[in-house]
Image (cartoon, rainbow, N blue to C red):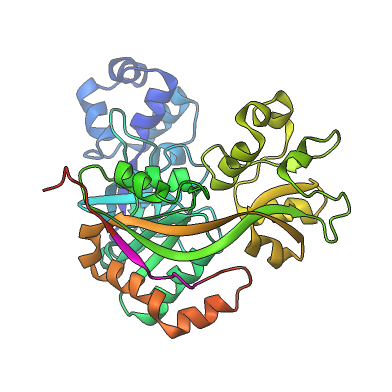
Amino acid sequence: MKDARLFSSLRKHRVAIGFSQAELAKRVGVSRQALIYIEAGKQTPSTHLALALAHSLGCSVEDLFRLTAGQVVSSRLAEPHASTERVVLGRVGDDLVAHPQHDETQVADGYLLSGREPGSDTAKVELFSSQTSIDSNLLVAGCAPLLGVLCGRLGRQYAGLRATWIPADSSQALSLLQMGLVHVAGIHLASDIDPDAHANLARLALPNQTATLVNLAQWKQGLLVATGNPLDIKVATDLLQPGIRYARRSPGAGAQQLLGRLLGNDKQDRPAENTMPLASTHTEVARLVSTGVVDAGVAIEPAALAEGLSFVPLSQERFDLVLAKSQIEIPSVSRFLSLLDQSSFRSEAGRLPGYDLSLSGHLSVLENPLVG
């Protein structure tokens, strides 16, 4: 393999087993200094030594050493314990950030060579994509399927730019933004009686910056039930009837927070709640209902319409994009936001049932008195 480099994950395996460097060095008959060089990738072990190390650590040589064709870089991990080692990458500020690529049909930017490095939130990643492509990748977190449409259009319309949708509930998206792991967070956490909730949450997520809210769409959120509503489920409290099974979401999801407000958290947190199937997205709620796994679930109207389900509205909501005002000057961000006003996007999104685009593109700058 031309220009291949040897990458060592010896340290990760040694730490996992609980061996010190001195102990492992003694077991395989080398000096501690030699082991330090091998772990750092500064020295290549002989075949005999590689086999001895693998035997001592109870793994294969391939688990400890591999040839890498691409550049190896350090990157912050958005999910240190993700089940996949394939990642998509983007640059947020000065940091390279890696998010797991769970969809095997989609291209990955790199491969995770090691877990979180001790004492840090970084790991080594072998790059599949160019640094230029990675640096131009806009990372957008949120739960609205429309974000996938918007991200796809950026790369098609503007050469050299791309965007990746990171599916996440509203609270997770805000957390990723606050930690500097995405450029944009999409949220729908405001209740009908608290229209300023999104502005307040944006200021909390970006306490030392001027935050900006941009509306993507409005929608109805409510109960998804089987076609024709055979169980006559009309209000949220009907979910508490004996024998009714409903999908639940993570505590940070806007759908779950709406359900909590309507049921009262004391009822929502009853023991039976934990036995209900957990859905990670609005689409998954709809599929659980359509396949009969559950009788109902709270999700957005577009998810119900896409699965041909009946829908009982509970709340009218905004889905807003949150970002730092300073990010708007970045070409990928400014052009991403410009898509909201383009007729081609509005025409496509307008043909997706359940989305109200009347406020789409409306921008609010949230002045923070603490920011000079």
Residue 55 at x, y = what percent?
47, 26
Helix, strand or loop for the magenta stretch, by majority: loop
Question: Which residue is found at the position 51% from the left and 40% from the top?
Answer: 252
Residue 30 at x, y = what percent?
27, 22
Report the front residue among 312 and 58. Answer: 312
Q: Is residue 309 left or right of residue 109?
A: right
Question: Which residue is found at the position 30% from the left and 66% from the top?
Answer: 333
Residue 18 at x, y = what percent?
40, 18
Residue 2 at x, y = what percent?
31, 62
Question: Which residue is found at the position 39% from the left and 78% from the top?
Answer: 341
In the rendered image, residue 58 lying in the magenta stretch gets the answer: no
Range covered by the magenta-colored residues: 357-364
Q: Is residue 114 left or right of residue 3?
A: right
| Residue 106 seen in the current view | no
The answer to whether residue 119 is above or below residue 115 is above
Report the front residue among 361 and 7. Answer: 361
